[in-house]
Amino acid sequence: MKFKMIAKVPLLAWGGIMAGSLWMIGSCSAQTAATLTIEAGHAAGNVSPMHYGLMTEEINYCYDGGLYGELIRNRAFLDDPKEPAHWSAVSGATLSLDAKHPLNETITTSLRLDSPSASAAAPAGLANSGYWGIPVKPATRYHARFFAKAAPGTSGPVTVSIQSDDGATVFAVADGPTLTSEWHSYNVTLTTGQDVKPSTKARLALTLKKPGTVWFSIVSLFPPTWKDRPNGLRPDLMQMMVDLKPSFLRFPGGNYLEGDTVETRFEWKKTLGSISGRAGHPGPWGYRSTDGMGLMEFLLWCEDMGAEPVLGLYAGYSLKGAFVKPGKDLEPFLEEALEEIEYVIGPVNSKWGARRAKDGHAEPFKLHYVEIGNEDWFDKSGSYEGRFAQFNDAIKLKYPQLKCISSIGSEQPEKLQVHSRKADVIDEHYYRPTDVFLKDSAKHFDNYDRKGPEIFVGEWAAHETAYPPWDKRAKSDPPTPNMKAAIGDAAWMAAMERNSDLVTMQCYAPLFVNVNEWQWRPDLIGYDALNVYGAPSYYALRMFSTHVGDEILKSSLPQGSALHQTVTRNSKSGAIFIKLVNPELTAEALTIQLKGLAAVAATARVETLAAEPTATNSLAEPKKVIPVISTISGIKPTFTHTLPPYSITVIELN
Ligand code: AHR
């Protein structure tokens, strides 16, 4: 067999182990090849069409300061009751919070600007540096919107500009209309010049050229968004997700669904409509959410990715231990959940279906799965049994087509699991070291009852460290994981895909991290205000999720083999996807035997991700570890392929 492999990663001698031969697949002196046997004559099961999905919540500045396009931090001036956090005064102006001049009943504070010495030569006002900088790009249109009213005697417009963080360079500027003494919203378009250099060292400034007093509320700035949606999403992050071809999105959490307290749960009704009616709320990860990412934005996000929602319903348990007793006390929360479902799929003549139509989407969204709570094994009161039963029964009565997911899986102690009802699906979470995934993957799902509930692995990730993500030592590690974690992830994905008749859905967590400040690692996709990169694990996931058939082919490796494998086939095209993980620091020759297959095309497409265990990607080196595509020829029903050291490989046969 001939190999045409382009070595993407330079020939390093990491740890002195493979000097000279690393990634030179064609010239590896392979030891005696082990055999991967594939029963290609018939399918052993069906791959769930919902298998590969995504999970998100407001963590690591995932929405605010991440996917949500809003560039202004603390736009509603509600982040800190004591001071206008993240805002600064420009040219001697004074800024203060003013609860006596609220915008409305929801946005209960405004920002008062006093600029007694403002002049055309020294405009005075306020500035915001966004989430670690405002991203400036050449020839780009930004949409600024703010609410303002002026004190009597204040004249002239507000000048809006995107400028360097020291104010010395103006990248884009425009005057808004003249203010009145009543609250109005003002829209201003700002366009940067062709010669502007991309930078995050910028701020938005709102200034007056004449002395005066002005109150501001909801100051917002959006760059171009995905599909140009108003209140929309950041295109580069969307592209990263779209490239994964996810079939579902689990939202809004995670802990973010539950909140620290009942009052700070994700209250979906408060996230609808104009952003001038969304006060936001404190999130469980140490910062306040704007609620700019509301239920409608989540649903449109799913639609724009071609994915369907897996909707997490608040079910009466919050992180600091408060729980709502099943029965009468729980009824209002159940009602809230039923109304939420109605908002998503109800007809337009239902109360909440009509509200959805008013919010711009008459057509019901797709929805097949709802999850009742999140990680309710933390509820030590034992109330989940009753809470699940109450939700499950009421949901099934009104929406028999929906599948209810229990948030307690069988990886949790038996006594915490739900017994009075058979959940359609159970959600299991696996945050494990690479070494544990490597050990556990081969057999993990073998003993599951195939007649039991479907398994949703609703959160999982390998960590390359011996300590878990919630250990304080993780704080000093990089936010995104390295190749060692990707190897663990790939072995785990192989296990889940081999069993994807049972593991009908799975999603890595957390998905996003703003590298400037974060609460949890490892994460799949890192970014700052301007740039984005995928961890090696992102590429491992992309290789898996974009090369999958609808049939599982039974495959086996000799006992004791360190390799991991999964094989699927597209029943329409006949394409066979062989995924292989080599966690060894040596190249491994493998004989691949396709039993029950008369013929196979002579060439195959191969995608390979290979690097030393500590290799990783970052903002500075976003593409250090990425897959390499090659073609191999001489393929027969039995052929040999050599897996590079420490590698993930997808072979696509026709
Ligand atoms: O993914 C991070 C957190 O891990 C989720 O919010 C929670 O569900 C889990 O404990």
Image (tube, helix red, strand yellow):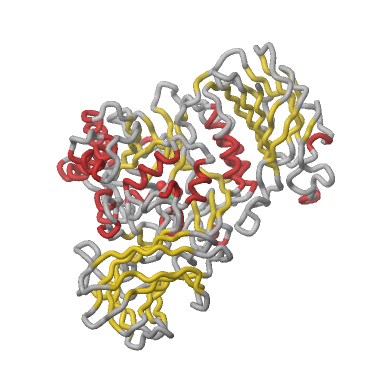
- Residue 475 in view, yes or no: no
Say which residue appears at 45% left-offset and 34% top-offset.
247
Viewer-nearest residue: 546 or 335: 546
Is 504 located above or below residue 312 in the figure? above
| x, y percent for residue 416 | 35, 39
- Where in the figure is residue 397, as x and y percent of width and height? 21, 28
Q: Which residue appears at 65% of the width and 21% of the height?
A: 654
The percent coordinates of residue 571 (x first, y second) are 55, 18
Quadrant of res 4: top right
Which residue is rendered at x = 35% and y = 28% of the image? 424
Residue 120 vs 579, above or below: the answer is below
Residue at the extreme bottom: 117
The answer to whether 308 is drawn above or below residue 622 in the figure is above
Residue visible at 29% across and 48% down in the picture: 317
Is residue 317 toward the left or the right of residue 255 in the image? left
Question: How many numbered tags mark residues here?
Answer: 0
Along the line of sight, the residue nearer the viewer: 125 or 475:
125
Q: Quadrant of the N terminus?
A: top right
Percent across and percent down for residue 175 are: 37, 71
Using the image as rendered, state which of residue 345 and residue 643 is in the foreground: 345
